[in-house]
Image: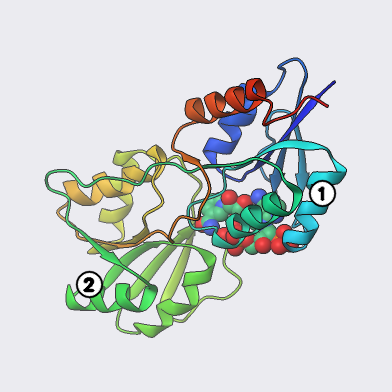
């Protein structure tokens, strides 16, 4: 009798959870990856790649594969898949947990401003007089950078974007990053402000520490609103939830 846990992944937390669960007797662990990166890291346990075709498709998959618990460990800014997970879990009657890394907290010397959307972020950057900006943002926000033609952006991401506005140059980068390396990049590129998302995570924090050390301001996109699902911030708390779900029978033995 094997219980089946599906982890919606693509994040460090998802890899760590799969690692912690893989190899446990009586448990099948599958990580789902969207398939955005050409050569994704292989998670521990089994994995599948590609979309489900919406909530109905995911619910059908959960039923067909006898999934006993679903953990949505996707990125804080991957809004669509989290909404899909909530709907699919409801349709299939599968317990759902949201595993979301805590947001960063500003400390002494940090000069951070929050923006609700890219338009507000660009207005803040302009108001700061920023002319050379390091942008560590998502694919969806890249096009908006064209809205500030007076700012030269250096965009850093794992994969090259499909199209680059004329005021944007791309540099490849895959975390985790170290503060010294981030400071060297900011100085070499004569960057005078940072534009990023409130993603959280230890590896992504280095650019913020480097900006603080160099006295640079940061404009940060606020996270999308959280949905209505039980939520934890650490892999240990997710393991405890799964253990409780298993022992209470919420996560049935099949
Ligand atoms: N957004 C980021 O900046 C970021 C950063 C690091 C990692 N990631 C990871 O990259 C993936 C895609 O991010 P996104 O922002 O493009 O997502 P999204 O906009 O929320 O999702 C768009 C669609 O992609 C499919 N999808 C997304 N994540 C999936 C997964 N883990 N397994 C299977 N299908 C998935 C779903 O398609 P269907 O409707 O067809 O099921 C979903 O409706 C996520 O898994 C996320 O954890 C994202």
Drawn side of residue 23 relative to residue 205, left or right: right
Asked if one can make out residue 169 in the rendered structure from this viewpoint, the answer is yes
Nearer-N-terminus badge (1/2): 1
The reply to whether dot 1 and dot 2 touch (C-beta < 8 Å) is no
Local SS, label 2: loop
Drawn side of residue 10 relative to residue 55, left or right: left
Q: Nearer the viewer, residue 167 or 135?
A: 135
Considering only vertical position in the picture, is 81 above or below 143? Answer: above
The quadrant of the rendered image in which ligand 1 is seen is bottom right
Q: Position of residue 190 (x, y in %)?
A: 25, 62
State which quadrant residue 81 falls in: bottom right
Q: Is mark 2 within 8 Å of ligand 1?
A: no
- Which residue appears at 29% of the width and 55% of the height? 186
Marker disc for residue 61: 1
* Crowd around label 1: few <14 · some 14–19 · many ≥20 (10 Å): some
Q: Position of residue 157 (x, y in %)?
A: 50, 57
Q: Position of residue 28 (x, y in %)?
A: 77, 27
Query: What residue sits right under mark 2 in the picture?
Result: 130
- Quadrant location of the C terminus? top right
- Which residue appears at 78% of the width and 60% of the height? 56
Q: Nearer the viewer, residue 57 or 38?
A: 57
Drawn side of residue 232 relative to residue 162, left or right: left
Q: Which residue in the rendered view is the most extreme toward the left? A: 108
Considering only vertical position in the picture, is 30 above or below 254? Answer: below
Please tell me whether mark 1 or mark 2 is closer to you in this view.
1
Asked if one can make out residue 37 in the rendered structure from this viewpoint, the answer is no
Considering only vertical position in the picture, is 21 above or below 138? Answer: above
- Quadrant location of the N terminus? top right
Q: Nearer the viewer, residue 178 or 220?
A: 220
């Amino acid at each position: 009798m094997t219980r089946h846990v599906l982890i919606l992944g693509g994040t460090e937390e998802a890899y760590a959870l799969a690692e912690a669960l893989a190899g446990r007797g009586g448990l099948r662990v599958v990580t789902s990856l969207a398939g955005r990166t050409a050569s994704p890291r292989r998670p521990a346990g089994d994995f599948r790649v590609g979309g489900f075709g919406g909530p109905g498709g995911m619910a059908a998959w959960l039923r067909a594969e006898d999934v006993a618990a679903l953990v949505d460990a996707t990125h804080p800014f991957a809004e669509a898949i989290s909404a899909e997970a909530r709907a699919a879990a409801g349709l299939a009657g599968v317990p759902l947990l949201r595993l979301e890394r805590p947001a960063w907290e500003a400390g002494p010397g940090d000069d951070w401003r929050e923006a609700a959307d890219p338009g507000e972020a660009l207005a803040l950057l302009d108001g700061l007089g920023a002319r050379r900006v390091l942008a560590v943002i998502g694919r969806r926000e890249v096009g908006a950078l064209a809205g500030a033609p007076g700012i030269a952006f250096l965009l850093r991401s794992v994969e090259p974007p499909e199209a680059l506005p004329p005021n944007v140059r791309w540099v490849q980068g895959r975390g985790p990053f170290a503060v010294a390396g981030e400071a060297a990049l900011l100085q070499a590129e004569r960057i005078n402000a940072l534009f990023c998302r409130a993603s959280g995570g230890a590896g992504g924090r280095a650019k913020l520490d480097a900006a603080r050390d160099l006295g640079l301001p940061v404009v940060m996109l606020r996270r999308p609103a959280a949905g209505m699902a039980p939520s934890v911030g650490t892999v240990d708390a997710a393991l405890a939830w799964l253990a409780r779900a298993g022992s209470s029978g919420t996560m049935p033995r099949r």
